[in-house]
Amino acid sequence: MMPSGLQPSAGSSLVTIRQLVARYPAFTEKGLRACIARARSAERRGKATEGQCQLLKAQVRPAFATRRLLIDERQFLFAVGLVSPESPTAVAEPVAAQIGTADRQRMTAAPASNRQGAMKKQRVRVLEEQSAIVLDNESKERALVGYVISTVALAGQISREKNVSDHGIDMEIEFKDDRHEPMGEMLFLQLKSGDSYLRERKRDGAEIFTIKDERHARYWMAQKFPVLLVIRSSGGEVRWMEISSYLRRESDNGKKPVKQIVFEGERLDVMSVRRWREKALGQGLA
């Protein structure tokens, strides 16, 4: 028989601990155990109400120990501090709403020091995930830079990275003459790594590169030497296409804006680099 004053409140129900956990998905036995530990600590410090102390002794500890004894759910939640002492009979949905996800429940149920630790770990996980995305993008970009450098070197030419690429030029290639001396003829490269940069046009299957910043298009058209758009797919295929003359043609020499490029790139390899060199030797690129 329950002690006086501990009868089930109106609208409440008698449940086992397991049923309580099943009824509220945000609860876990680990979280409830932390609530009980916090309530017992408050009891020892004299900060728990008399009603909470009675409930902890008469219902909470025995019910949690056996998992089979029935306990009044509302009074249980009041005893362990999940319901305000001023309103020990109002719990069900408000508690679930306040707790939210299982992770938030574990944070809320834990002592203050553990709660801060859990929140810190969650922030660290978020930062690690964001860092992984950044590192993944950087690794793709570096893989493309490395490919260009090695391919141009195998073709016997010179490649350089730009220190600042905000305007849309990441690298340059300078060609050598037959005496293996730099000849001042160049290509400028805009590098993009990933499948997201090209979309397929539905009506004809053409690959479309979207120009997000019109300033880049104007900058590419203004260059003395050809600008090539270099795109590396997720599968490692690298293609390039000369775009400065394309933009001049499509924009009527800058009279109208161009928002996209129909990408028809060829494979960037040693032979394609050498073909550009032959053009530079023959008629020049400027």
Image (tube, grey):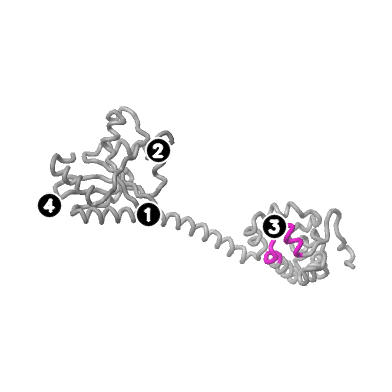
Sequence-first tag of 3 and 2: 3
Q: Which residues are magenta?
A: 17-32
Residue topped by disc 3? 25
- Give the Cα separation between the discs numbered 4 and 1: 32 Å
- Quadrant of residue 107 within the rendered picture: bottom right
- Along the line of sight, which residue is nearer the eye, 259 or 77? 259
Judge depth for marks 2 and 4 and give the one in front.
Answer: 2
Say which of marks 1 and 2 sits in front: 2
| Mark-to-mark CA distance, 1 and 2 | 26 Å
What's the mark number on residue 181?
4
Residue that mark 1 sits on:
140
* Disc 2 residue type (three-letter): Gly
Q: Are the residues flagged by discs 1 and 2 in contact, CB closer than 8 Å?
A: no
Q: Does 256 sit left or right of 63 as displayed?
A: left
Looking at numbered disc 1 in the image, what kind of residue is underneath it? Answer: Lys
Where is 244 relative to 28, above or below?
above
For numbered disc 1, what is the local secondary structure? helix
Q: Where does the image place residue 115, in percent across and percent down from the top left?
A: 62, 63
Query: In the structure shown, which secondary structural element does the residue marked by tag 4 occupy?
Result: loop
Q: Nearer the viewer, residue 252 or 208?
A: 208
Q: Disc 3 versus disc 2: distance between alpha carbons? A: 48 Å
> Does the magenta run of residues contain 29?
yes
Residue at 64% in and 56% down: 101
- Label 3: how many Cα within 10 Å (few below 14, some 14–19, many 20+): few
